[in-house]
Amino acid sequence: MISDEVLALATLRGVVTPEQAEALRGLARSEIEADRADLPPPPSMPAAVAAADSVDDENLRFITSFADIFVTIGIALFSWAVADIVAHYLGETAKWGVLAVAAWGLAEFFTRRRRMALPSIVLLLLFVAAAFNFVLGFVTPDDAGAYLVRRFQHFGGWMHWDPRSALIAGLATAALAALHYWRFRVPITLAAGCGALSVAFVASVHWLDPSLGGDRYNILLLLCGIGVFALAMRFDMSDPARQTRRTDIAFWLHLLAAPLIVHPLIAAYMNYEMLGTRAAFGILGIFLIFAVVSLAIDRRALLVSGLTYAGIAFSALIRQTGLVDFTRLTSITVLTLGLFILLLSAGWRPLRNTILRLLPPALAQRLPHPRSQMS
């Protein structure tokens, strides 16, 4: 940044006019304010390590120091105490409203001023969850509210919410998440907002057609997952070098999209009591497709979301061979999955090189790190 003394000297010597000097000072001030609004800052690391990690790692700005963990513990204790006291005196709906206000207030200090990574994430999640539950409790009719209480005592899935109330709560939460992002710029906020919009979308369809079954819910969730995945790829492909906050936004969007895509696709094959050979191979085939996609886009969320299903399918195949004692079936399955993860991690870069070479060059160049990995 050019100092005021240098600008004053440049003005005296006629290098710039006083108006130009003042314009430069204003530009410098605006850039400083913009930098202060960006969250969270990247942790410091040696340049060589950063260059090596940026090749094939998903760098996530999660914890900048142990102070993040310390503050997060304090937030958890404070929020639990506030929730318990307010619920006792004012009721459940008021509890969520007070928690949302408290989360915003704490974010004003720990997020906007201190720029702490982990507390910012926790406070955002607390704010969104509290806002959703507050609006849901506020707009749910009394008779439906009593029904919801009974349902949650024996939880049968979020599809049992009153659909009109869930629609309003989802839309309101998405709007509040957008306001939170405008104020604090926490990367996970967009994923939280997309989650709220997904709830609103499914609730709207359920409101229009109350007879929806589980299969059609899975289709709706799959559509939501594809939409979130497309948005995540938009952010990823706009920053292939992964040097800006857009890559952090994309990470959280991928983390949301993965279960929304994986569960509906595999749910049709699942029969936990007796998974047949054909269904097991179908699940493993879908899992391998997820592996190829994950390698191509250099994101691991799809693989992580599909690991449990892959383990169930592999366990079913081993059980049907009769070669392994049933008491050791779980250990063999976990061992196989662990070995697969380790081998895939070790060969991630060469495998990705191969996949990128098979893709059209125009597409490969837009994916993360195409030049550094294909050179």
Image (cartoon, grey):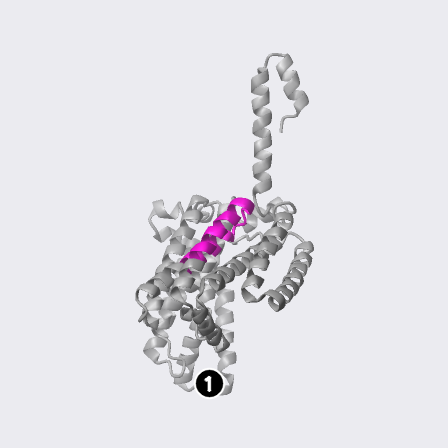
The residue drawn where x is 49% and y is 66% is 341
- Point out residue 342 in the picture as x, y percentages from the top left corner: 52, 66
Answer with the quarter of the image where residue 225 lies: bottom left
Q: Nearer the viewer, residue 278 or 194?
A: 194
User: Can residue 45 be seen at all in this image of the molecule?
Assistant: no
What residue range appears in magenta?
Answer: 170-199
Q: Is residue 153 visible?
A: yes
Residue 102: say if magenta.
Answer: no
In the rendered image, the vertical position of residue 270 relative to residue 237, given as above or below: below
* Total numbered circles: 1
Q: How far across and down, in percent of the image, does residue 136 sit? A: 47, 62
Residue 144: image quadrant is: bottom left
Query: The residue tagged with tag 1: helix, strand or loop?
Result: loop
Find residue 101 and report its horizontal and vertical position in percent: 58, 54
Name the residue located 35 percent from the left edge and 53 percent from the top edge: 358
- In which quadrant of the rendered view does residue 62 lie? bottom right
Residue 71 image offset from top left, x and y in percent? 67, 56
Q: Is residue 185 magenta?
A: yes
Instruction: Name the dominant secondary structure of the magenta segment.
Output: helix
352 versus 214 height, above or below: above
Question: Badge 1 is on which residue?
Answer: 324
Above or below for 171 versus 361: below
Q: Quadrant of the N terminus?
A: top right
Residue that appears at 47% across and 73% down: 146
Q: Label 1: few (<14), some or many (≥20) within 10 Å? A: few
Q: Disc 1 marks which amino acid?
A: Val
